[in-house]
Amino acid sequence: QVQLVESGGGSVQAGGSLRLSCAASGIPDRINSIGWYRQTPDNQREMVASVTTDGATSYAEYVKGRFTISADSAKNTVVYLQMSTLKPEDTAVYYCHVNARRTTRGWGKSFNTRDYDVWGQGTQVTVSL
């Protein structure tokens, strides 16, 4: 059973810190990346940070220097998002996201690949003045 278990959300005052964690399990295919998105007031999901299995990280411009994403050194299916210097505008529901690749045999010696997304249930982060 595919599962993304998120934890670490909560309420904090501006300037404070929180750490989110996401543990992925049951994904039968190669994981390309694990990351965090957040829901905007107009119900769009925007990428906050992500890390590939090769260790490459990406950040939204507005969190650079404040947030750090990292993978557990022992379990590469566990990812952490350290959020520091939080601002009220960081208030949102944060979703863990996995992008994975399924590879199947095609004709002869060929292979077909298809990337797909898995989402967590979301965790609330509230930052107050």
Image (cartoon, rainbow, N blue to C red):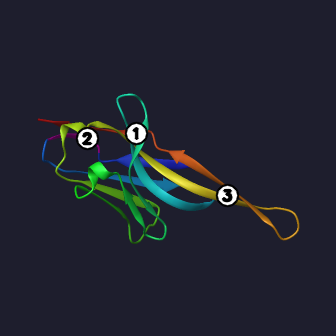
N-term-proximal mark, 3 vs 1 = 3
Query: Which mark is drawn over residue 90?
Result: 2
Q: Amino acid at mark 2?
A: Asp
- Image vertical order of residue 51 relative to residue 84, above or below: below
According to the image, label 3 marks what residue?
102
Which image quadrant is residue 94 in? top left
Question: Does the magenta stretch mainly form a helix, a strand or a loop?
Answer: strand
For image coordinates 16% across by 50% down, the residue present is 85
Q: Are marks 2 and 1 in contact (CB under 8 Å)?
A: no
Q: Give the residues drawn in magenta, as a range.
A: 9-13
68 lies left or right of 6: left
117 lies left or right of 17: right
For image coordinates 39% across by 28% down, the residue present is 42
Q: Amino acid at mark 3?
A: Arg
Q: Position of residue 61 (x, y in %)?
A: 31, 52
Q: Position of residue 87 (x, y in %)?
A: 18, 42
According to the image, label 1 marks what residue?
122
Q: How much space separates mark 3 and mark 2, taking CA atoms?
A: 34 Å
